[in-house]
Each structure stands twice: as structure tokens, then as C-alpha cells.
Image (spheres, rainbow, N blue to C red):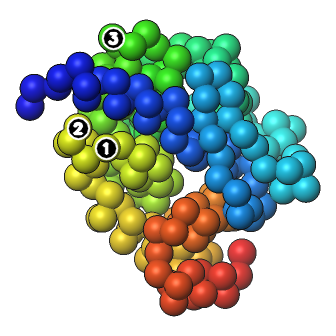
């Protein structure tokens, strides 16, 4: 498909103005207001929504690729350009076959698009799409991988042709969340997925009510 300058400008507007999901990792529940992603910041929920214990480094592995460590990087990258650069560099050369780590690499590439020059934004989004494809192929039933891809693809304009997995990812996420605690998600990830699905209107009212009744 030929991408016109209009398409590139539309992508720039999307990446710089659409809601970000990265900060969802620091929310107990999703507030009524939307997050707004700017060139180097993201509007976060009030401090009352932040649970600092969720992302404590004291109890996690020293590995830079531990899921909790990657979530913290993702959260920080959403609100700070320098953190986004650090997150991208951490994962840029990662080529092992861990699907979840690769999914975070895809997320880092998507965030990189926010801070890249106007001529490189589309390249990073396409890189992210390829990385997500690889991650899912390695661990197709992992709901956190699907969530990361869904959170990016659901905010991309259809004309890019990079949102083809939205429906299947949403279905897997909904079923996983309804099956919690046998969802494949830890408590923190479950809260994030449920908050995103309900707060962003990705599920029906009936489905939202069912999700709200699921114990953490």
C-alpha cells in the first residue's frame, strides 16, 4: 500500500495525541478521564490511583527482562522521552525467543514512534507490528502479549493496515480476564487488562459488569 504524506501526518497526530496504555500499569482502577499522550508526556490519573507496591523492585528478579521490570520501564517511557529512549535501547538488540520480552520490545518500538522524527514514525510503528507478530507466534495464548499488541493496534488508523488483530486479541483478553485467576495474568496485569477493556469501552455493558464481578 502506498502511504501518502497525508497518511504520515495523520499517523503523527495519532501517535502524539491518542491515549496511552503504558501508564495503565500504575492504576488500581481506570478513572473516568482519558490519558492524553503528548510529544514527551502523558497525563496520568490522580495519585490516589497509584499503588506503589505493585511495581516494587525489592521483590523482583535482578534480570532487566523480568516482567515487572519491563512494566516499570513501559510506565516511565509513557511519561518521559528520556525514559522512552532508555526503554528502546534496553530492548533494541534483544533477539532471544521469549515472547513476552519481544512483546515489550514491540511496545518500546511503538513508543519510539512518538519521539522519532516525522519521517521515521511510520517505520517504528511497522517495526512494532513485526515484533508483535513474532512475539505472538512464540506464545500465542499469552494474554499479556496480546494485551500489549491490542493496546497499540486499537489506537492505529485503519488505513495503515496494521490493526488486523484487534478483534481476536480482544476476544482472547476478555475470555482470559473472565477466567481469572486462571487467566494467565498475575493480579497486576489482570487489573490493567480489565481496566483497559472496561474504561476504554472495548466491551459491552453486560461484559463490563461480568468483568467487574471477577475477584482479583
Which of the marked residues, 3 or 2, is nearer the chain's N terminus? 3
Q: How crowded is mark 1: few (under 14 residues within 10 Å), some or many (20 or more)?
A: some
Q: Mark 1 points at which residue?
A: 157
Q: Name the residue under label 3.
A: 119
Is residue 163 left or right of 68 when viewed as pictured?
Answer: left
Label 2 secondary element: helix
Res 160 → quadrant: top left
Label 3 secondary element: loop
Q: In this view, does 152 lie above or below 154?
A: above
Q: Is residue 139 above or below residue 9?
A: below
Q: In this view, does 75 lie above or below 175?
A: above
Q: Name the residue under label 2.
A: 160
The reply to whether dot 1 and dot 2 touch (C-beta < 8 Å) is yes
The reply to whether dot 3 and dot 1 touch (C-beta < 8 Å) is no
Residue at figure coordinates x 29%, y 23% from the top left:
8
- Pick whichever, 43 or 181, lies toward us: 43
Q: Is residue 88 above or below residue 19?
A: above
Residue at figure coordinates x 43%, y 10% from the top left:
117
Amino acid at each position: 500500500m502506498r502511504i501518502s504524506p497525508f497518511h504520515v501526518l495523520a499517523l503523527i497526530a495519532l501517535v502524539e495525541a491518542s491515549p496511552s496504555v503504558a501508564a495503565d500499569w500504575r492504576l488500581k482502577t481506570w478513572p473516568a478521564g482519558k490519558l492524553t499522550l503528548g510529544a514527551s508526556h502523558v497525563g496520568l490519573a490522580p495519585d490516589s490511583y497509584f499503588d506503589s507496591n505493585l511495581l516494587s523492585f525489592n521483590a523482583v528478579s535482578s534480570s532487566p527482562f523480568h516482567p515487572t521490570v519491563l512494566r516499570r520501564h513501559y510506565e516511565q517511557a509513557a511519561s518521559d522521552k528520556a525514559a522512552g529512549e532508555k526503554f528502546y535501547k534496553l530492548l533494541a538488540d534483544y533477539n532471544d525467543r521469549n515472547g513476552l520480552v519481544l512483546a515489550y520490545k514491540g511496545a518500546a518500538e511503538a513508543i519510539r514512534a512518538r519521539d522519532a522524527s516525522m519521517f521515521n514514525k511510520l517505520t517504528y510503528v511497522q517495526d512494532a507490528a513485526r515484533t508483535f507478530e513474532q512475539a505472538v507466534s512464540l506464545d500465542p495464548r499469552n494474554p499479556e502479549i496480546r494485551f500489549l499488541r491490542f493496546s497499540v493496534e486499537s489506537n492505529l488508523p485503519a488505513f495503515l493496515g496494521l490493526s488486523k488483530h484487534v478483534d481476536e486479541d480482544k476476544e482472547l483478553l476478555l475470555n482470559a480476564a473472565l477466567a481469572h485467576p486462571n487467566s494467565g495474568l498475575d493480579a497486576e496485569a489482570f487489573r490493567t487488562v480489565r481496566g483497559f477493556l472496561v474504561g476504554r469501552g472495548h466491551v459491552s455493558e453486560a461484559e463490563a459488569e461480568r468483568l467487574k464481578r471477577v475477584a482479583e
